């Protein structure tokens, strides 16, 4: 019930296209859903996060869509650029798990944006 | 630089040796986390500190692993009698406040056990 399932495992998009990465979860206690971007040899960097009281959050070219009833959330990268080529991780945590941010990560999506 | 700092960035050790990693969190952050990431996988939670108190340890953290956060500032993660299966990226993260607040990760320490 702690698992977060992420798809696809890898994604190739042309420059200017839309990249879409999906995640699904089982634990209904999850109430915080961040997305992290990771470049090779670097630590994950927080991109954008959403809480279940809203269905969508947009920051620049990055949008999270959240479907509470389906227990799914997705990351959309608009106008994808070669510099966006990285591994993206969705994650989830519950404020009921001791009141701190114990993140459960998906397995990651390796995005390649071709010029 | 005011981000989370980890040292060393890379460590190669022989099987059976002990290793220690250090993490310096963002200065005002009261919460500190250790995660482990193997190749092609997402990070997995290892342990959590609130100030100097270690409040949760994952089952992934065997008896060979120990973590400390003296005085609620920097933290160390020690692995005794390393095994090849310990080879991974060890990530430290920190956050501030209560509930689910943003967690910021360091660059990680890449451990290779030969």
Image (tube, grey):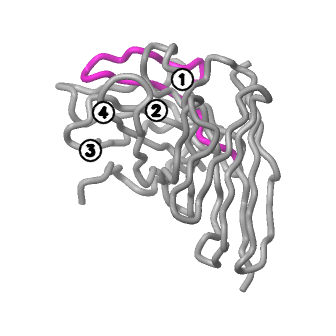
**Residue under label 2:** B79
**Residue under label 3:** B26
* Pointer 1 or 4: first along the chain: 1
Judge whether A65 appears above or below B30 on screen.
below
Whether tag 2 and tag 3 are in contact, CB under 8 A, the answer is no
Q: CA distance from mark 3 to mark 4?
A: 9 Å
Q: CA distance from mark 2 to mark 3?
A: 24 Å
* Pointer 2 or 3: first along the chain: 3
Q: Quadrant of residue A18?
A: bottom right
**Residue B43 falls inside the magenta stretch:** yes
User: Is residue B74 shown left or right of residue B106?
Assistant: left
- Which residue occupies 70% across, 19% down? A27
Whether tag 4 and tag 2 are in contact, CB under 8 A, the answer is no
**Residue B4 falls inside the magenta stretch:** no
Badge 4: residue crowd in 10 Å (few <14, some 14–19, many ≥20):
many
* Pointer 2 or 1: first along the chain: 1
Q: Nearer the viewer, residue A53 or B10?
A: A53
Q: Nearer the viewer, residue A106 or A51?
A: A51
């Amino acid at each position: 019930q702690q698992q977060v399932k992420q798809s696809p495992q890898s994604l190739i998009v042309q420059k200017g296209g839309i990249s879409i990465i999906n995640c699904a979860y089982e634990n209904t206690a999850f109430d915080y859903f961040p997305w992290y971007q990771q470049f090779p040899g670097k630590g994950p960097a927080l991109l954008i996060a959403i809480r279940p009281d809203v269905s969508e959050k947009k920051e620049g070219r990055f949008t999270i869509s959240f479907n509470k009833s389906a227990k799914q959330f997705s990351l959309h990268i608009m106008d994808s650029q070669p510099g966006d080529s990285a591994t993206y991780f969705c994650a989830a945590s519950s404020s009921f798990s001791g009141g701190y941010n114990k993140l459960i990560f998906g397995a990651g999506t390796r995005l390649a944006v071709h010029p | 630089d005011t981000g989370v700092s980890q040292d060393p960035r890379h460590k190669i050790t022989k099987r059976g040796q002990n290793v220690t990693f250090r993490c310096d969190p963002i200065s005002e952050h009261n919460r500190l986390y250790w995660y482990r990431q193997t190749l092609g996988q997402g990070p997995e939670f290892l342990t959590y500190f609130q100030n100097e108190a270690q409040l949760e340890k994952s089952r992934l953290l065997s008896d060979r692993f120990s973590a400390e956060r003296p005085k609620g500032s920097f933290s160390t993660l020690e692995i005794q009698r390393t095994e090849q299966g310990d080879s991974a990226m060890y990530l430290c993260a920190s956050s501030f406040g209560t509930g689910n607040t943003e967690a910021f990760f360091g660059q990680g320490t890449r451990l290779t056990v030969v």
